[in-house]
């Protein structure tokens, strides 16, 4: 069974792309077959894997619009064979183009269903909104992983995300479970960071990953080099955290 995981949080800049790029590579290193779907027109995940989205002749936009088959756009990264469906700025227009399309919430799911069998895990990096693209990402997934930044107002907007997940289940019939909330950009020397982490664990008992992703400069630097943290700084605390996250993630079955 392929696990399809949407990495989502309507709040911007919380680490969605960082998690979407770095968690899969540690799963790939464990021998898992992994695909990352970049479903954000900012194309940050695509860039982070060393692909220049501006020069891409074909991206997820073209597959979504049915111009090409989804397998035609998949690229293999040099990192343990981990694969990516790249995005490009064209995807911004998809929201409008999808308006009058039948089954518009399921366009990404239709695409993913065609390639799904080749993978153990498919991660979808989603944009910071609850618009049509994020709805498509949720409708294509069995699970949601929610990165939560260890900062002031971390939980702001989370209620809307949880409500959207509920609406997707009830009105669109897609049974998406919550894998868990993942604390990101944690600074153990900062009191606020520690307090926020504690508060989140108190608010969502049983839903928060034991592993936390530290705030480390190497995680912000790696994207510029087109490498994941496993190649850029394999012995860093950040790489250690992602390695532990991969192990925790494999053993965790999502809760409702
Ligand atoms: P958006 O909502 O715009 O898609 P996002 O939720 O995908 O943002 P990221 O792009 O992953 O968030 O992270 C926001 C910024 O913080 C980026 O510059 C990234 O390099 C940096 N960053 C992410 N995680 C960490 C971390 N653990 N430590 C240090 N910097 C980080
Ligand atoms: Mg992002």
Image (cartoon, rainbow, N blue to C red):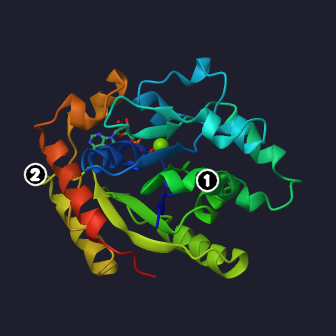
Q: Report the residue marked by disc 1.
A: 112
Q: Nearer the viewer, mark 2 or mark 1?
A: 1
Residue 237 locus on image (x, y percent): 12, 44
* Label 2: how many Cα within 10 Å (few below 14, some 14–19, many 20+): few
Extreme residue in the right direction? 100
Task: Determine the residue positioned at 81% across, 45% down.
Answer: 96
Extreme residue in the top direction? 55
59 sits left or right of 6 in the view:
right
159 sits left or right of 102 in the view:
left
Q: How many marks?
A: 2
Q: Quadrant of residue 65?
A: top right
N-terminal-most mark, 2 or 1: 1
* Label 1: how many Cα within 10 Å (few below 14, some 14–19, many 20+): some
Q: Report the residue marked by disc 2.
A: 189
Task: Determine the residue positioned at 42% across, 63% down.
Answer: 145
18 sits left or right of 163 in the view:
left
Q: CA distance from mark 2 to mark 1?
A: 42 Å
């Amino acid at each position: 069974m392929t696990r399809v995981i949407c990495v989502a949080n309507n709040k911007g800049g919380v680490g969605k792309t960082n998690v979407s790029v770095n968690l899969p590579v540690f799963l790939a290193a464990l021998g898992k077959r992994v695909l990352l779907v970049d479903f954000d027109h900012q194309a940050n995940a695509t860039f982070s894997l060393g692909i220049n989205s501006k020069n891409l002749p074909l991206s997820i936009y073209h597959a979504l619009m049915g111009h090409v088959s989804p397998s035609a756009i998949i690229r293999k990264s040099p990192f343990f064979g981990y694969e990516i469906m790249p995005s490009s700025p064209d995807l911004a227009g998809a929201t409008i183009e999808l308006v009058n399309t039948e089954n518009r919430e399921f366009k990404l799911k239709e695409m993913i269903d065609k390639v799904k069998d080749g993978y153990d895990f498919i991660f979808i990096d989603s944009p910071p909104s609850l618009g049509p693209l994020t709805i498509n990402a949720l409708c294509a997934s069995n699970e949601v992983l929610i990165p939560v930044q260890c900062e002031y107002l971390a939980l702001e907007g989370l209620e809307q995300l949880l409500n959207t997940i509920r609406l997707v289940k009830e009105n669109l019939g897609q049974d998406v479970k919550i894998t868990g909330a993942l604390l990101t950009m944690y600074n153990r020397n900062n009191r606020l960071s520690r307090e926020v982490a504690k508060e989140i664990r108190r608010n969502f008992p049983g839903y928060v990953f034991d592993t936390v992703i530290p705030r480390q400069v190497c995680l912000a630097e790696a994207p510029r080099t087109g490498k994941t943290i496993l190649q850029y700084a394999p012995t860093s605390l950040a790489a250690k955290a992602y390695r532990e996250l991969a192990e925790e993630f494999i053993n965790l079955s999502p809760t409702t």
